[in-house]
Amino acid sequence: MRLSDALRISARASCAFVGAGGKSALMGRVAAELAGELPVVLSTTTRIALHQRQLATHHLILQDKVELPALRPFLESPGTILITGRVASGEPSGLDWIASVLELVRKLVSQAGESC
């Protein structure tokens, strides 16, 4: 059984993983399971290790939420995109405006209808 099925994660779902340890591995596995079917957006509110960029096929670094429209092309086909803030101290930083990412993704997916 796929982990995404066990967790009942389906298209257009928003998921949050919290706790001490294992979040990135879980996020990566679920994303890999779903990436062939639909676009998967990954992000974090904390830093993520540089090597964990491999969790996604694309890594979009945004400095400010006004840059969010750059996400649109990545939502047009299946695959994974990791969105982080700037790289500082060798690690991509998290986004303190993650709610804006979720809001835009929901809006773009809604506009795309069933094509996403």
Image: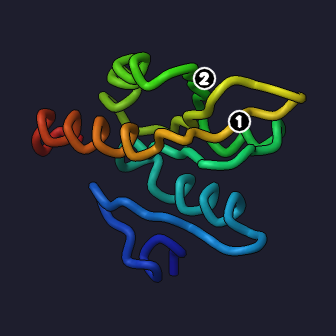
- Please provide percent x and percent y for residue 55: 67, 45
Is 64 in front, or is 50?
A: 64
In this picture, residue 87 sits left or right of residue 111: right
Q: Which residue: 81% across, 26% down? A: 88
Q: Which amino acid is tagged 2?
A: Ile
User: Label 2's element?
Assistant: strand
The numbered dot on residue 40 is: none
Q: Is residue 82 above or below residue 10?
A: above
Does label 2 or label 1 sit earlier along the sequence?
A: 2
- Please provide percent x and percent y for residue 54: 72, 39
Q: Quadrant of residue 12?
A: bottom left
Q: Quadrant of residue 65?
A: top left
- Please provide percent x and percent y for residue 85: 63, 29
Q: Which residue: 68% across, 74% down? A: 19
Mark 2–mark 1 Cα distance, whole angstroms, equals 9 Å
Q: Which residue is mark 2?
A: 61
* Label 2 environment density (alpha carbons within 10 Å; few <14, some 14–19, many ≥20): some
The numbered dot on residue 93 is: 1
Q: Is residue 36 above or below residue 50?
A: below
Label 2–label 1 contact, CB within 8 A: no
Q: Quadrant of residue 68?
A: top left
Q: Which residue: 76% across, 25% down? A: 87
- Locate the C terminus by quadrant: top left
Residue farthest to the right, as pictured: 89
Is 7 in front, or is 96?
A: 96
Q: Which residue: 69% across, 24% down? A: 86
* Label 1 environment density (alpha carbons within 10 Å; few <14, some 14–19, many ≥20): many
User: Label 1's element?
Assistant: loop
- Please provide percent x and percent y for residue 107: 20, 38
Is 94 in front, or is 34?
A: 94
